[in-house]
Image (cartoon, rainbow, N blue to C red):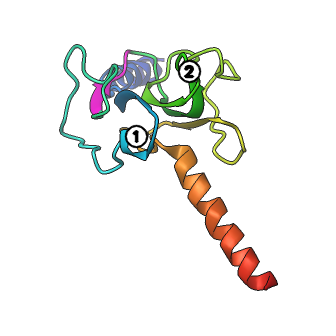
Amino acid sequence: MKSFALFLLVALAMLSSAAALTCYKYETTHKSEAGKIDEGAFDPDKACSDNDGAGDSTPCVQTCEDGLTICYNYYQDRGFGGSGNYGRSKGGCFSEPVDDLWTSEGCTSNLDTASDNLRNCCTEDNCNTRPNAASTLSVMSAVFAILLMAILA
């Protein structure tokens, strides 16, 4: 019985000393490719200060609150802003749906869909480095279309 109690104490100590998850935090609106987050701007040594990452296109590293175990990227290609002509990229520690267009309570990746609101959810430190997820899909679709036309010609 004593060894079991000692085991529980050691296990609890290990859990409480585990480092908190860190995620890249950023948010930006864009009307063209030039306004999107530069995928080379992710610096694991740039820690967020109080207001960094909110409305900022330069990602910083955010330490998640206790209990938060998921990092996310959210990409909206269009339909954002008053005119509906803007897109948005947002990332950070996931605690709740980002806006009304988020289609589930939890964080589930949907990068393999044709949705205008793409999410990448992951559980490792600084894993959310896909701020422009749809652009990757668009490039892949264009390459596939070109290959298909070449094959059919």
Which element carries disc 2, helix, strand or loop? loop
Q: CA distance from mark 1 to mark 2?
A: 18 Å
Q: Please report the bounds of the magenta region as a residue range.
A: 60-65
Residue 59, image x, y percentages: 30, 34
Is residue 64 highlighted in magenta?
A: yes
Q: Amino acid at mark 2?
A: Ser
Residue 89, image x, y percentages: 46, 32
Residue 32, image x, y percentages: 45, 41
Q: Is residue 38 above or below residue 49?
A: below
The residue depicted at 45 percent of the width and 17 percent of the height is: 67
In this view, the residue in front, 76 or 61, is 76
The residue depicted at 70 percent of the width and 68 percent of the height is: 145
**Which label sits in the foreground, 1 or 2?**
2
Which element carries disc 1, helix, strand or loop? loop
Is residue 94 highlighted in magenta?
A: no
Name the magenta segment's main secondary structure: strand
**Mark number displayed over residue 22:** none
Q: Residue furthest front?
A: 83
Q: Is residue 42 above or below residue 85?
A: below
Left or right of 87? Residue 64 is: left
In this view, the residue in front, 30 or 23, is 30
Instruction: Identify the residue position indicated by label 2 in the image.
Output: 83
